[in-house]
Image (tube, grey):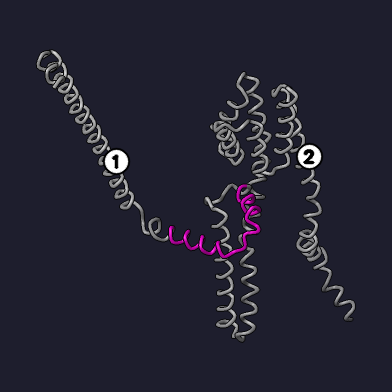
Amino acid sequence: MELYALFSLNPTILLGLASAFISLAVLAVLFGVYKERRFREVRVRLDEMNQSYRGDYQETGQTLNFMERVLRPFGRNLLARLGRMTPSGNLIILRQQLRMAGNPANLAVIDFLGIKMLAAVATAILTAIYLISMRGMAGGQAIFFALAGGIVGLYLPNFWLSSRIRQRQTQIARALPDALDMLTTMVDAGLGFDIALIRLSERWDNPLTHELDRAVHEMRMGVRRMEALRNLANRVDVPELRTFIAVLIQADQLGISISNILHVQSEQIRQLRRQKVEEKAATMPLKMLPIIAFFIFPALFAVLLGPSIPGVLKAFGG
């Protein structure tokens, strides 16, 4: 009763309360309209993105051939399943070897193990088919030789991977002196060592620049420069590059100028390369000796002694 009397006596309070309620209602409606508008904008954007993804997928499905859409995913799935059947004790070694080979065909460890299993099974089957159908060998003997062929096929991918590693290490060792000369020139011109690495990886295209580009990306991601270079040495495992990176790390710890280190290392690696070439040239006579003994000497004897052979035979025969 007291509140009713107060409101009846003070219409200003009633007007203020009504204005406040109306203002709150208007604000609530405006807030709801704003939220609904934002929701509609987000929904429209999501619909546009879904349509663009569908369009990209349809375009991709139209451009990809049967091998890209069916055979390659099926092959990778088969290799992964076969790879899971192999022992996992040598996974770390295989991962390191794949890094040293430059990750050929973007093969993972499980894919390479699957290739090994597939090569073993295929070699065993082909050996058994050949021995039974072509040679007429008995079943027990054919199975024995098929198992031996499967063991050989199991290690064939390892031989291929080892050859890829040696080939890549040779390419890196050959490109290292020229790369050091270029780095020395750029650092002397005023560029920083990191910028010189970037410029070198942009201008040249070889396994060494690929590894340098990867090291630069690691440094951009927050890895310290010397740690990135140490990872580079572990990935490549080339003695000359490992020695150069070790010298760089010591120079960074001792505060020695990188320019002086580059000059000294460039000259040393050039000299080491010259010594290796001279060493290979010194071994050439030994490598040529079997060729001379089995191919050149018989032809020389035939030319020199051939005309006298009939006279010798006639003399001894008479």
| 8 in magenta | no
- Say which residue appears at 52% left-offset and 50% top-offset: 106
Amino acid type indicated by mark 1 = Met
Q: Residue 256 at what x, y percent from top left?
A: 74, 22
- Image quadrant of residue 261? top right
- Say which residue appears at 65% left-offset and 39% top-offset: 231
Q: Nearer the viewer, residue 56 or 244?
A: 56
Q: Quadrant of the C terminus?
A: bottom right
Q: Residue 297 at what x, y percent from top left?
A: 80, 62
Q: CA distance from mark 2 to mark 1?
A: 62 Å
- Image quadrant of residue 10? top left
Element type where label 1 sits in the image: helix
Q: Residue 182 at what x, y percent from top left?
A: 63, 28
Q: Nearer the viewer, residue 251 or 42?
A: 42
Q: Quadrant of the N terminus?
A: top left
Q: Which numbered disc flags the more N-terminal residue, 2 or 1?
A: 1
* Viewer-side label of 2, 1: 1
Q: Residue 141 at what x, y percent from top left?
A: 64, 83
Secondary structure that dominates the magenta span:
helix
Apparent side of residue 179 relative to residue 290 in the rendered image (left or right): left
Apparent side of residue 81 relative to residue 161 in the rendered image (left or right): left
Residue that carries the numbered disc 2 in the rendered image: 275
> Which segment is the magenta one?
73-99
- Say which residue appears at 55% left-offset and 38% top-offset: 205
Is 293 drawn above or below residue 61 in the view shown? below
Q: Residues within 10 Å of mark 1 (few under 14, many from 20)?
A: few
Residue that carries the numbered disc 1 in the rendered image: 49
Q: How many marks?
A: 2
Element type where label 2 sits in the image: helix
